[in-house]
Image (cartoon, rainbow, N blue to C red):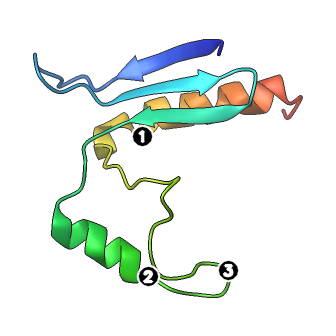
Amino acid sequence: MPLLFIGIDPNTGDHESPTIWVDQEKQELVLQGWKPDSALEAECAAFELPGHAKGIPESEAVVRIPARMVPMIREACDAVERANGVQ
């Protein structure tokens, strides 16, 4: 998987490191973040609307990313769009 490193939480310490990459082959954002507490995960799992059933599929996960990383998320989105020819 050819990952393009975008950035790491600027406030990261020795033990935590929310990180953002782009999978250039699959054209996907890859996020490493904090696991939610049980209350947040339950709230996400209870969310339902057309096309989004209750629950979290086994193949998916809820992660938390600090808002200070929004510029990196934008950069990752731009990288994916450039690779797809979107200007």
Amino acid carrying label 1: it is Val
Q: Is residue 16 left or right of residue 6?
A: left
Q: Nearer the viewer, residue 61 or 28?
A: 61
Towards the viewer: 71 or 62: 62
Residue receiving disc 3: 51
Please indicate whether residue 61 sits to the left or right of residue 14 in the image: right
Q: Nearer the viewer, residue 52 or 66?
A: 52
- Marking on residue 9: none
**Which amino acid, by three-letter code, is at mark 3?**
Gly
> Tag 1: Cα neighbours inside 10 Å, few (<14), some, or many (≥20)?
few
Amino acid type indicated by mark 2: Phe
Q: CA distance from mark 1 to mark 3?
A: 26 Å
Label 2 vs 1, first from the N-terminus: 2
On the image, numbered disc 1 is attached to which residue?
A: 70
Circle 1/circle 3 CB separation < 8 Å: no
Q: Residue furthest front?
A: 58
